[in-house]
Image (spheres, rainbow, N blue to C red):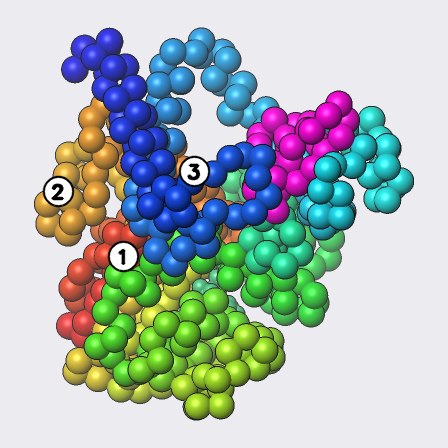
């Protein structure tokens, strides 16, 4: 394709994908959202966001590719590093600015906000303006800031806030020493979870162990981590599995490493035919029980959910159930540990059981390889001239891969890597359910 034709094709992709998104918003609520509104659009909390995420993947990918092509490279290069959004988001989250602004629907002057949170007003104004420029908060008048649809996500009641917190605290701390871990002979070639960059930084403060040991040590920290998993439902659009996978055909589901039930709670509400077993470490299940008693007491009363402590490296999950669901579990661990988990799950399977691994499937940048996977397994490849992996439209997959490296010395995997792991554990891939961001890989006993 000639250079100019590529730009024209990208413009067409931007146009059609934006129009697809507009149509979806209109179909789900009659109107399109605005950046300034505070109320969520009905589509924001929809269980199935696959169509919207499909449109946004193309829109973001095509837009970034077009602007990187047209902008001077020096301009784009510095854009890659001059990203202080997370430092400003840390201020907003630590100081509960969204919650405060809820009391000031017409906005609050930074001088008044400064008195409430004890941050120097002129510095605070710069933080708020940077975030507002990104679309998070609204500068309604000079130095007067109000909430908007995006900033409302940082409200205390929203679990996404806990995932933001995990990133601005732990991932940022790991990122700051990442290069050092690559060069330090002690850690450079290690894939031990205890040598992950975040733990490397913690070691210097006298804290040992791996990430989950660190989480266990402090109730507030652990509870925030588990709440952040509920945030993933919206971030990754993971709950689409509830409408795409035929849970109505099955009667038992084991949520392996299910945490507080970020997946199982909505499952219990939407598929009342299913009996759920949640396996996790004992401390996680204490929190799980109290959340279920509040958020889904009917499932507890009807014995549709049981909580069973399990160390998935050492124990076999409840045997002979229909579905074994592992969401964001395998990506937390390097290959050796992941193989142990899958081997234990394999031992639990009955002849008709299925294993569902719900994770990102890292796309290739080789169009040839991506097309092989597309024709054999149905994984979607982006149309040319987009990069075959949708480029920036799929950026979170690669960012989360880095988060896994920083926190756990682990990774998101390609389909080939999943196949190597699953085949060694005695599992056979039956189908890949592409949910526009993460995928669900369905396995049977080989
Ligand atoms: C990334 S979270 C995913 C939670 C849940 N699957 C979800 O998607 O919401 C990882 C989970 O693995 C659990 N976990 C970590 N080590 C474990 C172990 N050795 N045995 C069982 N669960 C473990 C953690 O407590 C946590 O709930």
Q: CA distance from mark 2 to mark 1?
A: 16 Å
**Magenta span includes 151:** yes
Residue 130, image quadrant: top right
Q: Is mark 1 within 8 Å of ligand 1?
A: no
As drawn, the residue found furthest toward the front would be 30
Left or right: 214, with 255 as reference point? right
- Mark 3 or mark 1, earlier in chain: 3
The residue positioned 76% from the left and 48% from the top of the image is: 103
Of labels 3 and 1, the one closer to you = 3
Tag 2–tag 3 contact (CB < 8 Å): no
Query: What is the secondary structure assignment of the residue under circle 3?
Result: loop
From which residue to which does the magenta span run?
127-152
* Vertical comparison of 125 with 195: above or below: above
Tag 3–tag 1 contact (CB < 8 Å): no
* Vertical comparison of 353 with 417: above or below: below
- Mark 2 or mark 1, earlier in chain: 2
Q: On the image, numbered disc 1 is attached to which residue?
A: 418
Q: Is mark 2 within 8 Å of ligand 1?
A: no
Q: CA distance from mark 2 to mark 3?
A: 38 Å
Quadrant of the image containing the C terminus: bottom left
Query: What is the secondary structure assignment of the residue under circle 1?
Result: helix
Q: Position of residue 429 (x, y in %)?
A: 18, 63
Q: On the image, numbered disc 2 is attached to which residue?
A: 372
Q: Position of residue 424 (x, y in %)?
A: 23, 66
Q: CA distance from mark 3 to mark 1?
A: 39 Å
Pointer 1 local density, CA inside 10 Å: few below 14, some 14–19, many at least 20: some
Q: On the image, numbered disc 3 is attached to which residue?
A: 32
Query: What is the secondary structure assignment of the residue under circle 2?
Result: helix
Q: Position of residue 109 (x, y in %)?
A: 81, 32
The residue positioned 36% from the left and 84% from the top of the image is: 275
**Magenta span includes 432:** no
């Amino acid at each position: 394709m000639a250079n100019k034709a590529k730009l024209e094709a990208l413009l067409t992709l931007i146009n059609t994908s934006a129009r697809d998104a507009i149509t979806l918003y209109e179909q789900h609520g009659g109107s399109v959202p605005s950046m300034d509104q505070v109320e969520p659009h009905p589509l924001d909390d929809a269980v199935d966001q696959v169509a919207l995420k499909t449109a946004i993947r193309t829109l973001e990918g095509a837009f970034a590719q077009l602007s990187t092509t047209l902008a001077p490279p020096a301009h784009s290069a510095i854009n890659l590093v001059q990203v202080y959004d997370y430092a400003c988001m840390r201020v907003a989250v630590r100081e509960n600015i969204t919650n405060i602004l809820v009391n000031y629907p017409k906005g609050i002057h930074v001088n008044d906000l400064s008195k409430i949170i004890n941050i120097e007003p002129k510095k605070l104004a710069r933080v708020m303006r940077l975030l507002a420029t990104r679309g998070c908060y609204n500068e309604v008048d000079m130095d007067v800031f109000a909430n908007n649809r995006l900033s409302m996500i940082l409200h205390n009641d929203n679990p996404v806030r806990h995932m933001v917190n995990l990133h601005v605290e732990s991932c940022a701390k790991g990122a700051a020493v990442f290069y050092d871990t690559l060069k330090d002979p002690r850690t450079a070639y290690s894939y031990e979870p205890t040598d992950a960059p975040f733990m490397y930084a913690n070691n210097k403060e006298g804290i040992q162990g791996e990430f989950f040991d660190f989480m266990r040590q402090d109730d507030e920290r652990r509870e925030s981590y588990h709440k952040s998993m509920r945030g993933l439902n919206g971030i990754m659009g993971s709950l689409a599995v509830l409408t795409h996978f035929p849970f109505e055909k099955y009667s038992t589901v084991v949520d392996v490493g299910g945490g507080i039930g970020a997946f199982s709670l909505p499952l219990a509400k939407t598929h009342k035919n299913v009996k759920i077993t949640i396996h996790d470490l004992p401390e996680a299940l204490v929190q799980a029980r109290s959340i279920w008693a509040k958020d889904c007491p009917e499932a507890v009363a009807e014995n549709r959910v049981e909580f069973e402590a399990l160390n998935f490296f050492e124990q076999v999950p409840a045997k002979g159930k229909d579905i074994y669901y592992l969401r964001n579990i395998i990506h937390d661990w390097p290959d050796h540990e992941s193989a142990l988990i899958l081997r234990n799950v394999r031992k639990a399977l009955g002849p008709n059981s299925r294993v569902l691994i719900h994770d990102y499937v890292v796309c290739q940048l080789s169009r040839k390889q991506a097309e092989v996977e597309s024709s054999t397994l149905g994984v979607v490849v982006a149309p040319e001239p987009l990069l075959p992996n949708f480029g920036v439209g799929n950026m979170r997959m690669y960012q989360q891969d880095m988060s896994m490296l920083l926190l756990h010395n682990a990774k998101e995997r390609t389909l080939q890597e999943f196949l190597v792991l699953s085949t060694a554990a005695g599992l056979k891939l039956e189908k890949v359910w592409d949910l526009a961001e993460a995928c669900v890989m369905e396995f049977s006993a080989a």
